[in-house]
Amino acid sequence: MSDTYQHYVDGEWIEGAGDETFESDNPANGETLGTFHRGTPADVERAVAGADEAEAEWRAMSRIDRAEFLWDVYHELRDRHEELGEVVTKECGKEISEGKADVTEAWHMVEWAAGDARHPKGDIVPSEIPEKDAYMRRKPRGVAGCITPWNFPVAIPFWHMAVTLVEGNTVVWKPAEQTPWCGQIIAEMMVDAGIPDGVFNMVQGFGDAGAAIVEDDRVDTVLFTGSAEVGHEIAQKCAEDPGKRAACEMGGKNGVVITEKADLDIAVHAAVMSSFKTTGQRCVSSERLIVHTDVYDEFKERFIDVAEDVAVGDPLDEDTFMGPLIEEQHVEKVTKYNELARTEGVNVLVDRTELDDDEIPEGHEEGHWVGPFVYEADPDADLRCTQEEVFGPHVALLEYEGDIERAVELHNDTNYGLAGAVISEDYRQINYYRDNAEVGLAYGNLPCIGAEVQLPFGGVKKSGNGYPSAREVIEAVTERTAWTLNNDKDITMAQGLSADIKTRDE
Ligand code: UN1
């Protein structure tokens, strides 16, 4: 048995065709968590072939029987909550309550998908002709390629795969290269649950393996959650093949509107959570706080106070609010954006890009640390720092004057449209925001993070074209058949169309 973790392909653990390996490192202290074989396009080819082969038998089973495999996974996720929460925290650096919440979110998704198998399904549709029964049927699309990110390394794989499997598709999954250990554990759970050979396949690796999934003709659906850059490439590639569908959920430059009618306790609490939870590394994190001039000074003072003191540190320590960034390259990216903001002439209010030595917990010198970076900018200026997604604790305060219409105009002044929030005690302002904010997920008097699995999750504009959660995944991974059955011996057509056959002799 090699101590390098393998791929799971067509019912077998394999080393794969390549000879490269890669490591998973704990972003808080640099410790190596495991070594993994790096998947190649040839490994993906084998996995897709297995998935394609297994499809006929899997789709022939009932949804209820397919769901039974997932109930085993559900119980394992629950039973191993504490342990897996720690694994998530160690591998992706999220503080421990978030690590555990990731696992909880995963079993919620499995519960939704497997529970849904026993729920009534489909639409009975009226027909103009009383003798006709019309209704909707759904069929699995076939092989689904799932490409998932590192920031929700257990939850998002189940967003993609739980419904997809219950609906009768087979899966080829590539976990993020930053969180292969979580990938390994999920694959082991699928194997333990006895999922038939070929139905679930996992290839560890990087973008080349992901691209091989997207490019394979036998892959019918690609589910992707990650950066806009990669997501748009995938959507474009899939569009070249008329039979292929891509459902992509990508990033955001999300805003929180704080009006003159806001309760500032709620505003500060929601803004801090929106901007700094997960160290700003959620696709729903907020990097723009749009604050009314009447409450601006007070909000600014209170927000700065927290940003200066918010606890950055060991994510396994329950007193930590922000863990490290995922990797050194990401520290470089966030640092560059913080510098860019200065170059663009903004007024920097808090700069904890480089933490003081005494802030870095002992034994964590190799961690990828950054703290909050807060600045104020002119909301009308055309700045890259307030337009481009940083994916870190980099946040702009944008002061506005005027009414809620003006606030929402600023809020919508971005190419993205994933999540957003409004903080106000005035229901008219809240409703205006609800109806006019260009986002897929919107919140009133809450942070703009924390969607539950039974809600559709996804954005508009540059943020996505797919909703990889609960019922909405069904749309992505199935085809509908509009089925009509005639109960009469005669054929009668709707719309007054004649069913008479006329011949030359008449
Ligand atoms: C993400 O931001 O990448 O709504 C996913 C939330 C989580 C999922 C976020 N349930 O914040």
Image: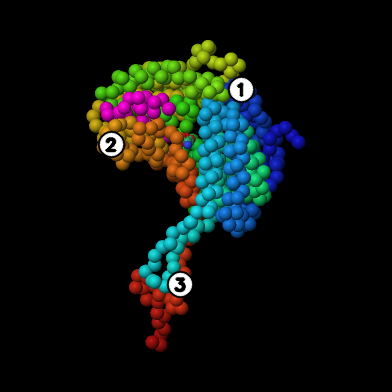
Identify the residue under disc 3.
486
State the image quarter where residue 345 is shown: top left
Q: Using the image, tell me which numbered label, if any, was put on residue 427.
A: 2
Q: Using the image, tell me which numbered label, if any, was put on residue 30.
A: 1
Q: Earlier in the sequence, mark 3 or mark 1?
A: 1
Residues 119 and 232: in front is 119
**Tag 3: residue type?**
Asn
Q: In which quadrant will I find the N terminus? A: top right
Question: Total label count?
Answer: 3
The answer to whether residue 268 is magenta is: yes
Secondary-structure class at tag 2: helix
Frontmost of labels 3 and 1 is: 3
Residues 12 and 264: in front is 264
Scheme by which the image is coloured: rainbow
Q: Name the residue rendered at 66%, 50% in the picture.
A: 196
Give the left or right position of residue 266, taking residue 17 as reference.
left
Secondary-structure class at tag 1: loop
Label 3 within 8 A of ligand 1 by Cβ: no
Q: Distance from label 2 to label 3 (Cα)?
A: 52 Å
State if disc 1 and disc 3 touch (CB < 8 Å).
no
* On screen, residue 254 above or below 61: above
Q: Magenta span covers which residues?
A: 251-273
Instruction: Tell me if residue 94 can be seen.
Output: no
The answer to whether residue 366 is magenta is: no
Q: Distance from label 2 to label 1 (Cα)?
A: 48 Å
